[in-house]
Amino acid sequence: MITTHEVRLGDGRVLVAHDAGADATGAPTLVWHHGSPQTGAPLDPVVAAAAARGIRLVSYARPGYGGSTPNPGRDVASAAGDVVAVADALGVGRFASMGASGGGPHALAGAAMHPDRVLGVVSLAGIAPFTEAFDWFDGMRAPGALAAARAGGRAERARFAETEEFDPLQFLPVDLAALEGRWASLGADAGRAGAEGSDGLIDDDVAFANPWGFELAEVAAPVLLVQGEGDRVVPRRHAAWMAAKLPNASLWMRLDDGHVSVLDTVPDAMDWLLDRVG
């Protein structure tokens, strides 16, 4: 059974959280950090994989998504305080984090800022902090949104959103097949998030393209990076660069995967976490 909660924060904001293991006692807890855009509602394949392993799955909507109060100007690090507030409200002590795409940086934030709470992290197709050590945009099929966020902050990114169109060539054929089949719930959820407005996505992009508020070197917990070799949304170089910067990182490079199909590794990634922090 999945229960939904409104978590009220000290600054007056509300975060919408979902608990797919409310009846679990003593089960390891995994917090899922959703992609951009998503509503934060648990995705069917993630729920099934967690249930099969006796994992309590918790997720929440970042500010501006899924009913959570927008927080313009937020950086990636701000997610650390939010996720701990959600955990506290649900009676969760220590937990692991897993983030997909735009959720990857936010999963890392919790481990950097609250090492006493976050036991380990998995980042699937997660973007790297902006750097000039390599061409950060190289390999992105549609870099316009992030380029606008980098060049002109929220105002420029919001202007870009007025004429923004989705480029389906960001996805490989294996990605499209995944969205039509086993990851159909992800595509449907992204559609719902888009229909709710663009605030969350705009704020995500601005946060990604500007200083995150922490350094990768501060993430002491074990981290698994999972990356599709053919990813046209977040290019492979991002994962390789982060693997060299994180103190305790493993990298799974998936030769035949793109941005969505790489999520098929979720069950194996959960096993990886259980082996280390379970």
Image: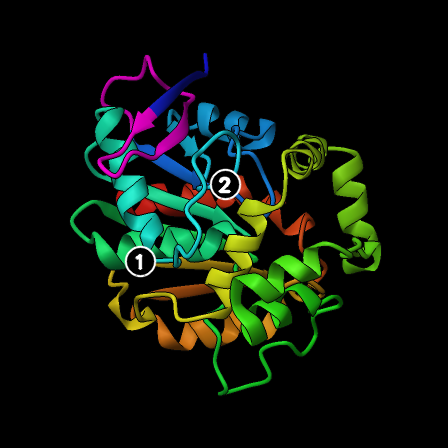
Tell me if residue 142 can be seen: yes
Residue 142 vs 98, above or below: the answer is: below
Could you tell me which residue is drawn at 50 percent across and 86 percent down? 132
Q: Residue flagged by tag 2: what amino acid is it?
A: Gly
For the C terminus, which image quadrant?
top left
**Circle 2 sits in a helix, a strand or a loop, which is it?**
loop
Residue 227 colored in magenta in the image: no
Give me the residue at 67% from left, 60% from top.
159
Residue pointed to by mark 2: 64
Q: Let me know if residue 221 appears in the view.
A: no
According to the image, label 1 marks what residue? 222
11 inside magenta stretch: yes
Estimate how packed mark 1 is, as few (under 14), some (14 to 19) or many (20 or more) residues with alpha carbons within 10 Å: many
Q: Which residues are magenta?
A: 7-27
Q: Amino acid at mark 1?
A: Pro
Q: Is residue 137 above or below residue 89?
A: below
**Residue 97, image quadrant:** top left
Q: Earlier in the sequence, mark 1 or mark 2?
A: 2
Magenta part, dominant SS: loop
Q: Position of residue 120 (x, y in %)?
A: 31, 50
Locate residue 129: give its quadrant. bottom left
Residue 122 location in percent, x, y?
A: 43, 51
Q: How far apart are the two marked residues, 1 and 2, measured between alpha carbons? A: 29 Å
Which x, y percent locates residue 201? 58, 50
Figure quadrant of residue 21: top left
Percent x, y of residue 216 = 33, 69
